[in-house]
Image: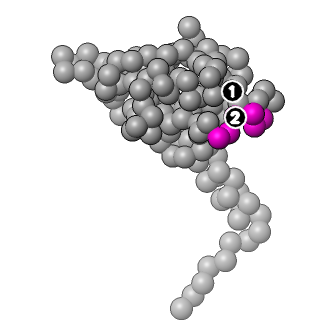
Amino acid sequence: MTVTVFPPMLRHKVAFFFATISTVVACSPREHGGRPPENQGGQALCSSTDQYGKASYYSDRLAGHATASGAPYEPHAFTAAHRTLRFGTVVEVVRLDSGARVRVRINDRGPFKAGRVIDLSSRAADVLRMKRAGVVDVCVRSGL
């Protein structure tokens, strides 16, 4: 049996290649890929510039902990975590199955679980009525 060992310089190039591909895939605006979801009439629920995927929410137990922006997490504020949007960006989050919507300000980084596009504050989750489900399908609209 023959084992192929990459030379050290080639190993770094291969590792860099896979890290680059992983970053491009992770930052893709369409977490689920393909066409955006449609309503029963065939009308797209998300525009081509929206992100869609899963939303989750922060536990109230994290109240007071520092967010990535340095601000403490406030469960009753309309805030959220997003991987790439600038801090202070206001986005609209639309729950796809009910049409409920809420505007939140990005003040943290995350979520770091595959398929999730945004983590919402407890108050924003209340507005979307998603606490029982825990994770729901959403469109995230920026550039408001």
Q: Residue at x 78, y 27 (%)?
A: 71
Q: Which residues are magenta?
A: 61-67
Q: Residues within 10 Å of mark 1 (few under 14, many from 20)?
A: some
In three-dimensional space, the C-alpha distance between marks 1 and 2, rounded to whole angstroms, equals 6 Å
Image coordinates for residue 36, horizontal then vertical, percent: 35, 26
Along the line of sight, the residue nearer the viewer: 54 or 78: 78
Secondary structure found at label 2: loop
Amino acid type at image mark 1: Glu
Say which residue label 1 marks: 74
- The quarter in which the N terminus is drawn is bottom right
Judge left or right: residue 97 versus residue 33: left
Image coordinates for residue 116, horizontal then vertical, percent: 50, 39
Cβ atoms at labels 1 and 2 below 8 Å apart: yes
Q: Residue at x 50, y 36 (%)?
A: 56
Image coordinates for residue 123, horizontal then vertical, percent: 55, 24
Q: Furthest-top residue in view?
A: 144
Q: Residue at x 62, y 79 (%)?
A: 4
Q: Residue at x 67, y 58 (%)?
A: 15
Quarter of the rendering containing residue 89: top right
| Residue 37 numbered mark, or none | none
Above or below: residue 106 compared with residue 143: below
Q: Residues within 10 Å of mark 2 (few under 14, many from 20)?
A: some
Residue 106 lies in the magenta-colored region: no
Amino acid type at image mark 2: Ala
Query: If you read the primary sequence from the N terminus, does the residue marked by circle 1 or circle 2 appear first?
Result: 2
Say which residue label 2 marks: 63
Along the line of sight, the residue nearer the viewer: 30 or 2: 30
- The answer to whether residue 27 is seen in the rendering is no
Secondary structure found at label 1: loop
